[in-house]
Image: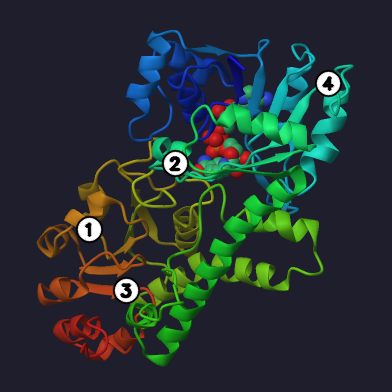
Amino acid sequence: METVCVVGLGYIGLPTAIVFALNGKHVVGVDTNPEVVELLHQGKIHIEEPGLQDACAKVLQEGRLVVSERPVPADAFVITVPTPLNHETNEADLSYVERATESLLPVLKKGDLVVLESTVPPGTVEEVMIPILQKSGLDPYEDLWVVHSPERVIPGNILYELEHNSRIVGGMNRESALKGKELYSSFVKGDILITDAKTAELTKLVENTFRDVNIALANELAIICSELGVNVWEVRRLANYHPRVNLLSPGPGVGGHCIPIDPWFVIGASPIFTRLIRTARTVNEEMPKRVCQFVETLMSKPGEGNIAVLGVAYKADVDDVRESPALRIIDILVKQGYTVKAYDPHVKGTYKGKVNTLEDALTDMDLAIVTTDHAEFRCLTPEYVKRLARNPVVMDTRNMLDSRDFGNAGVLVYTLGNGKQLGKSQLSYAEAASASDGAWQV
Ligand SMILES: NC(=O)c1ccc[n+]([C@@H]2O[C@H](COP(=O)([O-])OP(=O)(O)OC[C@H]3O[C@@H](n4cnc5c(N)ncnc54)[C@H](O)[C@@H]3O)[C@@H](O)[C@H]2O)c1
C-alpha cells in the first residue's frame, strides 16, 4: 500500500495525512472546503496544533503530500470527516460520512482498503457505508477491505499520540482487519488490536462515555460540596490517595467534538438501557446553567453589569470551540441582560462578545469568569485585575488561580465547588480567601 487518500483534512485528517507522508506513503489529502485546500496549497494549515505547521510544510515541499478537492485512485482511503450531533434529535448526523463514501465510488478498484476513522454509532460501517460501496459494482466483502479504525488522539498532542497510542482496527472480516493493521503499521508504535467493525465502533464510544460519566460524578460532587460547605478540590485531592480511586476535575461543563457527543450515539443505539449514561449527560449539560446561577449570586443586581469571560475554547491551550461550555455560558449571561466581553487568545473565529485583548475584557468588569484554563491566564495577577476592574471579583471554574494570593491582594476569587466560600457576604476578603485553603492539611 503505497498511496493513501485521506478524505477530510480537519483536526484528525490533516495530522493523519501528514504522519502517513512522514512515514513513506504518497498521500493525497482531500477536503471539500476550498479554503482549507487553498491554504494548504500555500503551505499553511488552518488549525492550531503544536508541530503541525512545520511537519506539513516539509511533506508538502517534498511532494509526499498533495492536496485535492476530490479523491483520486489510491491503495487505501481513510475517511476522517465530521460526525456531529443533530442537537434537535440527539442523533448522529452521518451525512458527511455518506457523502465522503460516495465520493470514493468513481475511483475505487478491486483490492482497495477503505477505512472509516470518524466516530460513529455502532453498525454504521455495515449499515451505512457498505450499501454505498456496493454501488461501485464491487463486492465490499470480496473485492474490498473495509474497516473502522477510531481515532483517540488528544488535541494539543496529536502528532505524538498518533504514533504512540494503541489503535483498534475493526474489520468487516478478519482479512480486512489484517489489511488495516498493515496500513497503520507504517507509523503506529503502540499496539494495533484487531476486532470486528461494530466492536471497534462501540469501543470508541465507550471510551468517551467513560470520561463523560466520570466528569459528571466530579461535577455532581462539586454541587454537593457547594451545598454542604465543603471544598470539592480538597475532597478530590484526599480521595485520590486511595489506590483505586481517580476522581476527575469538575468544571463548567464538557466540550469538544467527542465527549459530549459520543455518549448520545450509545444512547441512540440502546435507548432503554442507558439510564446512567443519559443522566451523566444531563448533569454535565446543566453545568453552564449552574455556573450562571452562581454568577448571579455574585452580582449586585441581577442582569446588570459587565462580565468578562476568559476562555472560549472547550479546553486549555487549543483553539477548538465545538460544544464549548463557555459559549453556552456567554449565551445565558447575554440573555440575562449582562454585558459580556469574551476573550480567548487561541480562538481566531468570531463569537458573541468577542474582544481582542485581555485588557479590554477586564476593563470596567464587575466579574470575570475563568472558563478555560489557558496557560495565558496563569499570568493573571491580582494587581492587574484590580487596576482594570470596576469590581475585583473572579469566578474560577477551573481552579487555576490561587484564591488565597488573590484574596490577600483584595481580589475575591470564588472557585467552582468550593462550598467553604459560601456565606461570602459575611466574609472579609482575607477570610473568603483562606476558606479556599481547604481542610487542615496534615
Ligand atoms: N477532533 C478530535 O479531537 C477527534 C478525536 C477523535 C475522533 N474524532 C473524530 O474524527 C472525525 C473528524 O473530526 P475532526 O475534528 O477532524 O473534524 P473537522 O471538522 O476538524 O474536519 C473535518 C474535515 O472534513 C472536511 N469534509 C467534510 N465533508 C467532506 C467530504 N465529503 N470530503 C472531503 N472532506 C470533507 C471538512 O471540510 C473538514 O475540513 C469525527 O468523527 C470526530 O468525532 C475527532
Q: Quadrant of residue 294?
A: bottom left
Instruction: Say which of marks 3 and 2 sits in front.
Output: 2
Residue 104 position (above or below residue 403): above
What type is the residue that disc 3 sits on? Thr
Residue 389 drawn at (x, y percent): 19, 61
Residue to which mark 1 is pinned: 364
What type is the residue that disc 2 sits on? His
Any part of residue 286 in sight: no
Residue 211 drawn at (x, y percent): 54, 62
Residue 302 position (above or below residue 108): below
Crowd around label 3: few <14 · some 14–19 · many ≥20 (10 Å): many
Residue visible at 23% across and 66% down? Answer: 401
Residue to which mark 3 is pinned: 415
What type is the residue that disc 1 sits on? Asp
Residue 378 position (above or below residue 345): below
Q: Secondary structure at mark 2?
A: helix
Which of marks 2 and 3 precedes in the sequence? 2
Residue to which mark 4 is pinned: 143
Distance between the alpha carbons at the discs numbered 1 and 2: 47 Å
Q: Are marks 4 and 1 in contact (CB under 8 Å)?
A: no
Q: Secondary structure at mark 4?
A: loop
Q: Quadrant of ligand 1?
A: top right
Distance between the alpha carbons at the discs numbered 3 and 2: 36 Å
Q: Secondary structure at mark 1?
A: loop
Which of marks 3 and 1 precedes in the sequence? 1
Q: 367 and 271: which one is in front?
A: 271
Crowd around label 1: few <14 · some 14–19 · many ≥20 (10 Å): many
Instruction: Say which of marks 4 and 1 sits in front.
Output: 4
What type is the residue that disc 4 sits on? Asp
Q: Secondary structure at mark 3?
A: strand
